[in-house]
Amino acid sequence: MRGEVQQGERRIIGEVDTWIKLDFTIRFNQAGTWQLLVKSGTAQEDLLKPGRGVVIYQDGVPEPVFSGQIDAFERYWTTDQHTAAGSVFVGGKCDNDLLYGTLAFPGVSGTGVEHMAVLPVAQQYKGSDTRVIGGPVGQVLWNEADMAFGSRALPDRKAGGLAVGPNAPLGPAVSGSLRFDNLGTQAEEWLKDKRVGYRFVWSHQTKQVELRLYECRDRSAEVRFSPDIGNLKQYTWQLKAPAATRAIVACQGEGKERYLWQQIDAEGEKQWGTRRETFVDRRDIPLMTGADGKPELVVKETSSSFEDIGLKPDGTEWTSDLTRTRAVHTAAEKEFAAAQKAVEDAKTAEEKAAASQRLTAANSALTEARVSLKAALRGARPVAVAHWVKAVEEAAATALKEGAKSGHFQIYPIDTDQVKFGRDYFVGDIVTVSVDGEEYSDIVKEVNISVEDGGRILDVSPKIGDQGTGEPLNLYRTVWEMKAKLRKLETRM
C-alpha cells in the first residue's frame, strides 16, 4: 500500500497481506479498476485511507502490473457472511485515471513542443479559442500530459508524486484541435487502431507514478491460446443468419415521385438461403424520382423566383461557383436598392441625371447577376444530387449492418506456467487464439484478475480484440471458416 504524497514521493507504507478477495482489471489505453475486500477492525483496514493507493505485483515480474488511488469505500455486513465486525470494500481506478480528470486548455503561451505552457483559467481569453495539435501520437500525448499536470503545468494543477518524463515521439502522426476536451477521452481517440500504448504506474525506484509510453509487441508467434496447449478454459462460437438482407430507402417525394433505392446483401442471401427486407423512411433526404426513373433534387422556388436547392450539411453552398455568384447577386441587389434611393433623393437636374445613370447600370448588373445565379444553381444541382444519393446508400448500408449476419467468438483463456500475463504478454501485445483449425491474432485489450486470500489466483481472463469492449468477437468470416473446417474434420473421423 502506498501512502499520501510527501516531498514529491508516494512511498510504500505497508503490505496488505491478508484479505478476502481482490479483483482488478487492466485496460489497454484506458483506466482500469480495482476492488479489495478486507475484514473490518484489522491492521489491513487501518492502511486503507483516502489519498493512499495500491501497488499490485505479480510473482516473477519486477515492475507492478497495476497501481491506483483509493476513491471509494463501502461497508459490508450480512447475517450470512462476515457476521462479526463485518468487512469493507475499498476500490478505485488505476493511475491512468489521471488523464480522465484533466482538461486540455486551449490557451497557451510559447510555441513549439517543450516550450508551450497553458495559461491560467482567468487568462485563457488571451490565447486562442481552439488549439491545433499535431505530431507523433506519443509526443502529442506526452506534451498534453506534461502541460496539464507535469513539469510545465500551472502550480495549482501539478500532480504531486508524478513524473511525466521525457518526450517520447512514438508512433504515427495524429492531428486535431483541442478546446477543453477531456484528455483521457482524447487519448483513446488518438491511440485508436495504433500500435502505441501508455501507462501511468508507480515506480519502486523513483517512488513516483511515472508515464510510460511504449510500442506494442507482436507476440502472436510466442503467446498462443488453444485447447491443445491447455490454456483455454472455455470457448464458444456462434453463427446467426442476417436479420436484414435487403434495405429499401424511401426519400422525400410523394406517391410515384417518391424515390426508392434498394441495397442487397447477396452473399448473406446465398449463404443462408433467406431473404429479409427492411424499410428505411428517410423523408429528410430531398430526392424524388424523375421522368427517366433517376433521382432528382426536390426543388422549391423562393420569393425571388430562384431555385431553393438547400445547403450542404456544414451550412455552405454546394459549389464554389454558386458561392461566388450568390455573393455577386447580393451585392448587385444592394447596389440596385441604393441606386433607387439615390433617384428618390436627387434634387437637382445634375443629381437626377447621375442617379438615373447609376440606376440603369445597377439594373443591368442585377439582371446579369440573376442570370448567372440561376445558371450556378442549375450547375450545382448534380453536386447536391450526388451528395444525397450517397446519403441514401449510407442509410441502406447502416440498416444492413444493424441486421447483418454475425459470427460471435467468445474465448476464456487462463494462465499456465508456459504462458503468463505480465511475464509473457501485457495489454497492447498481439497474441494468437487457435480453435477448430482456425487462427485469430489480435491485441489484448483487457485483462481481468481475481485473487483470493493468501494470494491464490482464482482467474486471469484476457480479452482479445473487440471482446475487450465487453462484446463477443463479431468475426463472421473467421467463424464461418471454423465451421467449414470443423465439418471437414468431422467427415474424416
Image (spheres, grey):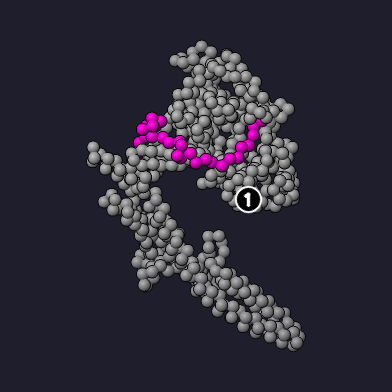
Residue 78 vs 360, above or below: the answer is above
When asked about the image quadrant of residue 160, the answer is top right
When asked about the image quadrant of residue 356, the answer is bottom right
Residue 482 vs 298, above or below: the answer is above
Tell me where residue 55 appears, x and y as whole percent.
Answer: 59, 26
> Which residue lies at the image location 48% right of the left edge and 39% below the top edge?
219
Q: Is residue 469 visible?
A: no
Tell me where residue 224 appears, x and y as whole percent.
Answer: 43, 36
Which segment is the magenta one?
A: 208-237
> Which residue lies at the image location 60% right of the left edge and 74% below the top edge?
329
275 left or right of 3 in image: left
Q: Is residue 221 magenta?
A: yes
State the quadrant of the N terminus.
top right
Three-letter code, disc 1: Gly
State the quadrant of the C terminus.
top left
Label 1 secondary element: strand
Q: Is residue 434 magenta?
A: no
> Which residue lies at the image location 63% right of the left edge and 50% below the top edge?
135
When asked about the image quadrant of residue 233, the answer is top left
**Residue under label 1:** 135
